[in-house]
Amino acid sequence: MAALRERLAIPVLAFGGILMAVMQTVVVPLLPDLPRLTGASAGAVSWMVTATLLSGAVLTPVLGRAGDMYGKRRVLLMALGMMTVGSLMCALTSHIGVLIVARALQGAAAAVVPLSISILRDELPPERTGSAVALMSSTVGIGAALGLPLAALLVQYADWHVMFWATTALGVLGTALAWWAVRESPVREPGRFDTLGALGLAAGLVCLLLAVSQGGTWGWTSPRILGLFAGCAAILTLWWWQQLRAERPLVDLKLAARPRVALPHVAALLTGFSFYGNSLVTAQLVQAPKATGYGLGLSIVATGLCLLPGGVTMLLLSPVSARVSAARGPRITLALGTAIIASGYVLRIADSRDLWAIILGATVCSIGTTFAYSALPTLILRAVPAGQTASANGVNVLMRTIGQAVCSAAVAAVLVHHTSLVAGAPVPTLHGYLLAFAMAGTVALVACAAALSIPADPASRETPRTGRPTGAPRDEALEGA
């Protein structure tokens, strides 16, 4: 039985990552109908997405640090449990206030991937870590590609609460499997949790992401948005000062400032931006009415099926990305992935009218994302001590989240300024979509440059459990950083 649990640990953790991505996307097909179903305004309904974004961004680094200190399995189960409780609350209510709180609880699932990656580093021998981490990283795209069409089918043919009952059942299954198959990691960094640092980071991130996500609605020059940006700058400046002086900081800023850690974080932000543009713009483009001259007028279900090949490709190519990292190093894999993303956008610009070309371009972007996302956690694992892997990967995932939020705002700004009237309603023009593709492709090239700027790994031989060079003290894992 113990051998069976050990063999199933990787697929169980991957299942948890897929669940996280599914939870984030299942609400998308509901958004147009939720004002009618809940009796709430469209602005209030939009908070079902914003709440998940904010809580996920705040909780990912916090739960990552808690995992390093108190046990990664314990915190992983807590994150999966919060996600499941949030889904159950959505299944039981139609009240918009309760739904928003429930979606905020589901945001805790964002910590599942960095915690799982840290567990894999602690538990697996080096020759298996690369492929397992690559699979874990790919679950983000796989879950998103699966979640959208499945949710759309349930919404189309059943009561919308059924969708949340289904995700609740999946959440219970994922939590139970993780409790059974995943053992507690022996690697910890004991100490007192930095509560002040956690509160400061939470306040700063809420101000930042709220301003970015609501800027188009409230107006970028409105007092509320300007006040949020000013508050973000002031709070994060004080937080930075506090972290540098804390005995056990939430985020080790001295470590994070080293090139081998800082540049992967920058690349994560840029990659998150370029990756999100693919699914975001594709979904809007293929659903545009045929009267626009370029739109295909597809349903939500058909739109999800257009993105499905990309998710399947990510699953199939994750072992390939691990082999490239083993042969050439993860920074080369990251550079290759971001270059492939950029080439995918070249295809999107060349032809965004034919369905086959749209699917091909979107799939190429997904291939690049597979390579890039598999390389980022590997770069972090090689650059930080074993006792900080969950918190460092949590920060890396946070940077991806910020990149996605900025991409959403930037794409919205581009499309709003390039519209034409179709049947009396403003609709984005094809030129606007092509500009969005060009913007995302350019950001991917900047991410490629950042990847190539990452210093090469120092030569070292790692042990299976700690990830530290054999016979060396822990700090030696940072040599050359």
Image (cartoon, rainbow, N blue to C red):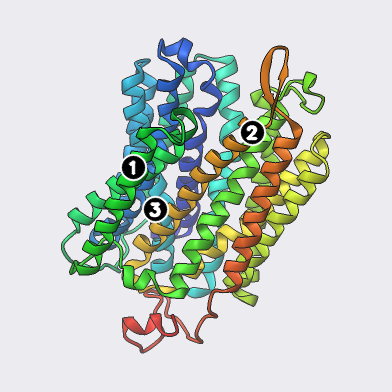
The disc, 2 or 3, on the residue closer to the chain's N-terminal end is: 3
Distance between the alpha carbons at the discs numbered 2 and 3 = 46 Å
Query: To which quarter of the image does residue 427 belong?
Result: top right
Distance between the alpha carbons at the discs numbered 1 and 2 = 25 Å
Q: Is 247 in front, or is 449?
A: 449
Residue 345: image x %, image y %? 73, 49
Q: Please name the residue that numbered disc 2 is placed on.
A: 415
Mark 2 residue type: Leu
Q: Please name the residue that numbered disc 1 is placed on.
A: 206
Measuring 69% from the left and 45% from the top, which residue is drawn there?
Answer: 437
Residue 279: image x %, image y %? 63, 40
Measuring 49% from the left and 52% from the top, which residue is drawn there?
Answer: 400
Q: Nearer the viewer, mark 3 or mark 1?
A: 1
Q: Is 22 in front, or is 395?
A: 395
Residue 323 is labelled as none
Left or right side of 255 for 315: right
Q: How many marks?
A: 3
Q: Secondary structure at mark 2?
A: helix
Residue 268: image x %, image y %? 51, 58
Mark 3 residue type: Ala
